[in-house]
C-alpha cells in the first residue's frame, strides 16, 4: 500500500511538472507585403492572360508549414475583415462567369522564412465564355507547422486587356 501511494504521488508530481513547462508555439506566422517587388498589393490591377509573379515574404518564429492562394469575386463588395487599403470599387453586380482560383503550396521543411515566387496567368475564359472582370479578393493564408495561420486579403481588379 505504501508503494502504491508513493507511485501515485510520483505520477502526480511528474504530471504537474510537465504541465507547467509549455514549449508549444502560440505565435501566428506573418505575411510581409512590404518587401521589394511584393506583388500583388492592395488595389493592384491584374489582367486576364497576362503573366505575373506572386511575391511576398512568409515568416514564423519556429517553422512554416504551407500557404494558400484564394482568388474570388467581390462583385457584391463583401468583406472578410482582412482587407486593407481604400480601393475604388465598381458598382455592385451579379456574377455571371466569375473567375475562381484556390491552390495550396508547400514550403520547404525547417523553413522559418520563405519568399514566394509563384508564376501565374489567369485565363481569360473557360468553356462557358469570358470570365467576369471587376473587383476580386486575392487572399493569401500561411499556416505554420503547429497549425497557426494568418490571412491577408487584398482588394484587386481583374480586367481584360
Image (tube, rainbow, N blue to C red):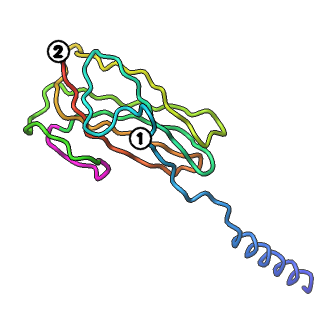
Disc 2 to disc 1: CB gap under 8 Å: no
Check disc 1 and report its element: helix, strand or loop.
loop
Residue 10 percent across, percent down from the top left: 84, 77
Relative to 59, is 109 above or below? Answer: above
Quadrant of the rendered structure where residue 2 is? bottom right
Residue that label 1 marks: 33
Residue 151 percent across, percent down from the top left: 40, 47
Residue that label 2 marks: 129
Residue 54 percent across, percent down from the top left: 41, 29
Q: Residue at x 17, y 26 (%)?
A: 133
Quadrant of the rendered structure where residue 161 is? top left
Instruction: Give the magenta part as a residue range.
Output: 75-83
Q: Nearer the viewer, residue 121 or 45?
A: 45
Q: Residue furthest front?
A: 36
Q: Nearer the viewer, residue 142 or 42?
A: 42
Q: Residue at x 62, y 45 (%)?
A: 63
Amino acid at each position: 500500500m505504501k508503494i502504491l501511494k508513493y507511485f501515485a504521488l510520483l505520477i502526480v508530481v511528474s504530471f504537474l511538472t510537465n504541465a507547467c513547462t509549455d514549449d508549444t508555439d502560440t505565435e501566428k506566422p506573418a505575411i510581409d507585403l512590404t518587401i521589394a517587388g511584393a506583388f500583388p498589393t492592395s488595389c493592384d490591377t491584374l489582367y486576364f492572360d497576362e503573366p505575373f509573379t506572386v511575391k511576398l515574404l512568409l515568416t514564423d518564429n519556429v517553422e512554416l508549414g504551407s500557404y494558400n492562394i484564394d482568388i474570388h469575386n467581390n462583385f457584391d463588395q463583401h468583406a472578410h475583415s482582412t482587407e486593407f487599403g481604400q480601393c475604388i470599387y465598381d458598382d455592385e453586380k451579379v456574377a455571371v462567369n466569375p473567375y475562381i482560383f484556390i491552390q495550396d503550396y508547400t514550403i520547404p521543411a525547417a523553413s522559418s522564412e520563405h519568399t514566394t515566387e509563384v508564376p501565374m496567368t489567369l485565363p481569360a475564359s473557360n468553356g462557358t465564355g469570358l470570365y467576369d472582370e471587376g473587383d476580386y479578393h486575392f487572399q493569401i493564408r500561411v499556416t505554420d507547422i503547429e497549425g497557426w495561420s494568418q490571412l491577408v486579403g487584398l482588394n484587386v481588379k481583374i480586367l481584360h486587356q
